[in-house]
Amino acid sequence: MLMRKPLSVLRAVIPAITAVVALSADASERGVEVAVDLGEYQWKNRVLLIFAPARGEPLFQTLHDSLMVRGADLADRDLVIFEVFESGPSTEGGEPLDPETARLLRKKFQVPNGAFSVILVGKDGGVKLDRQERSSLEQIFALIDSMPMRQHEMRRENP
C-alpha cells in the first residue's frame, strides 16, 4: 500500500532538495576553478607566471631566453614557470597547458587581453610580484632571494 507524505514533509524536503542542487552547481563552478588552483605548489614551489599575447612578444622572448640558460638557478629556487599566451600553446613547467586553463589563469590574475604581465607567487601562495612591464630574471631572483623563506633555505644549504 502506497502511503502519501503529508504536505508539511514536502514543504520541508523541497527547500533541502533546492539547497543540494544549488550546492552541486556551486561545486561544479568551483571544479572549473580547481583547474587554475595553484595550491598543489604551495609550500613546495614558487610559481612564475608569464602572460603574453603570443610567444613572439619581445618582452616575453627576452625573459624566456634568460630562463632557458638558468635552469640550475630555477631549480635552486624551486621555481615552476607558466607561460600563458592568448594565441598559441601555453605551458606549465614545460608541459602543455590546455587553452581553457590558460584562459582561466588570465581571468584569475586579471591579465587583460593584449597585455604582458609577470606574476610571482611565493611558496606561501601569496602574490609577491605583479608587473606589467619588462622584468629581468636578475630582478626576479633578487626579490626571491630577499624573501625570509628563501633566506632560510640558503642558510640551510650553506651552514
Image (cartoon, helix red, strand yellow):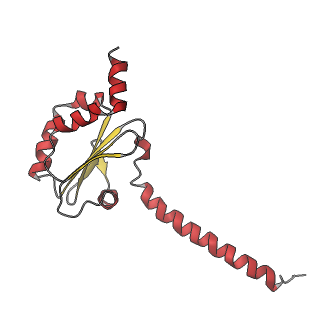
Left or right of 18 in this view: 26: left
Residue at the extreme right: 1
Q: Is residue 128 above or below residue 99?
A: above
Q: Is residue 77 above or below residue 48?
A: above
Left or right of 145 in this view: 1: right
Q: For the image shown, how many numbered marks are present on the structure? A: 0
* Quadrant housing the C terminus: top left
Q: Is residue 57 above or below residue 16?
A: above
Q: Position of residue 74 (x, y in %)?
A: 26, 32
Give 96 or 44, whichever is nearer the viewer.
Answer: 44
> Picture quarter containing residue 141?
top left
> Picture quarter containing residue 6?
bottom right
Give 34 or 143, whichever is nearer the viewer.
Answer: 143
Q: Position of residue 89 (x, y in %)?
A: 23, 54
Residue depicted at 38% across the width and 38% down the height: 123
Residue depicted at 14% across the width and 37% down the height: 66
